[in-house]
Amino acid sequence: MVNGDDILASIHETLASIPDPELPCSIVDLGLVEAVTMDDPGRVEITLLPTFTGCPALDMIADDVTRKVGELDSIESCHVTWIFDPPWTTDRITERGRDSLKSHGVTVSRCGGAPSSRTVTLQTSAIPCPWCGSDRTRLESPFGPTRCRSIHYCDACQNTFEDMKRLDGLGKTSTPDPG
Amino acid sequence: MTAMQDMMKDPHVNLVLSLADDLLMLGHVQGDWTGLGPILEEDIASSSMSQDDLSHALMLYEHLGSRFGLDPDVVAYERGIGDYRCCDLVTVPDEFDWAVAFVRRWMLAHWATPLLDHLIRTGEDDLQERCRRLRAEQALHLMYLDDWMRRLGTGAVEARDRMQAAIERISPLAGMLVETPDGVATSEFDALRSDWIAGMEEVAAAAGLSLDIELPSPDTLGGRRGVHAEHFIQQHTEMNEVRCADPGASW
């Protein structure tokens, strides 16, 4: 008889080994895994959060999770669901994830701009450059190589780098009141 | 009655479809610019926004599909022409004039914001949750488009003139966006229209561009009731070509 906790531990270990297809980071370190539940022995439900709704990697990630968790002993079936509440935010990225992203020239800035009722404010300056550490950086484009990254330029070392995009206005309380 | 007919009789569905169909068609039409944007960053941004628009349309079709027991692709593609609720502004040919394509997208992004707020206030839980997400992502488009509007309006003379000309070309058609869908109370829409115009006027003023939006004139209307222009039908046919040639195809 295999202990349920052992099975859950091995599921988490498996999830931590699945890389995001577009980032040097596991899906666990990226903060995509919201919940793993096993109400019936051997039947696993995994809830994931998409970074951006238009991310083309979502199907690939769901397939990887279903296949790799499904191959574990004692697992009969694995079902993946994407949900939007709670929203994924960059706060969910682990320290290990941040370190790995940074070593590949992708920063995770902590402070967003002040939320405005109509638009979002991306941090446009003072993200320390992951290459040289200078604060003399600026936003080049909010649309980068993947949906979740913006492009920045460092005036000090003249290199580009990317930042994990942060969206304001995702919380339930931040919707402007009518009128 | 089929599930599809059932769906089309619900007034709130018309409202959700008006936005979903605008985003689907605009995402498709703007896809023509992929590889042709004026600079690399703009090309990537435009393609990214089109990709977002298609996924945002899908989020809304999924919501309707789950309510009425229909596959979201069936909701997206298998309605008759008269059951599409997009306004025909989204398929008006831009004749590969970047400023025209840009101004159209800018106006639609400004419209999506008050409409999504409205759906967040009035929709059921699943719709609210989805619209909150869409609003945050559309707000990113708006930030980007507003920024370019200001830069081009206050930039070189040629940039300013081309933006102004594009605004003048699109403005007479812009009222199509705010045509009240069938079954939706006009009073609900009045506040949304004012929000839409105020948002655009603020940016246009900062950009030094003059903007004169005319509210719906009857001869441009019909899209929200399913009465569409020839250019919508052409784009719709093109979009469905693969689906019609090989139903159920996947890759």
Image (cartoon, rainbow, N blue to C red):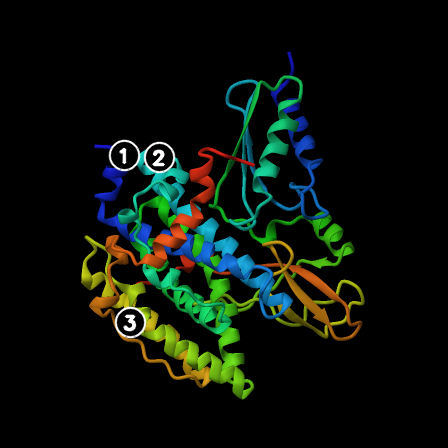
A156 sits to left or right of B47: right
In the rendered image, residue B242, in percent from the top left (x then y), is placed at: 47, 41
- Residue A25: mark in rendering: none
Read off the residue under disc 3. B194
| Residues behind callouts 1 and 3 on a single chain | yes
Q: Which of label 3 and label 2 is nearer to you?
A: 2
Q: Is residue A89 visible?
A: yes
Real-space CA distance between mark 1 and mark 2, rounded to the nearest whole angstrom? 7 Å
In the rendered image, residue B233, in percent from the top left (x then y), is placed at: 35, 53
Read off the residue under disc 2. B70
In the rendered image, residue A92, in percent from the top left (x then y), is placed at: 60, 49
Q: Amino acid at mark 1?
A: Ala
Q: Mark 1 or mark 3: name the one nearer the start of the chain.
A: 1
Question: Could you tell me which residue is drawn at 47 percent across and 84 percent down?
Answer: B161
B163 sits to left or right of B20: right
Q: Mark 3 or mark 2: name the one nearer the start of the chain.
A: 2
Q: Which of label 1 and label 3 is nearer to you?
A: 1
| Residues behind callouts 3 and 2 on a single chain | yes
Secondary element under disc 2, as helix, strand or loop, is loop
User: Are the two marked residues, 3 and 2, in contact with CB atoms closer than 8 angstroms?
Assistant: no
In this rendered view, identify the residue nearer to me: B87 or B81.
B81
Question: Could you tell me which residue is drawn at 60 percent across and 54 percent down?
Answer: A148
Secondary element under disc 3, as helix, strand or loop, is helix
User: Are the two marked residues, 1 and 2, in contact with CB atoms closer than 8 angstroms?
Assistant: yes
B35 sits to left or right of A16: left
- Residue B3: mark in rendering: 1
| Residues behind callouts 1 and 2 on a single chain | yes
Q: Is residue B97 above or below residue A148?
A: below
Secondary element under disc 1, as helix, strand or loop, is helix
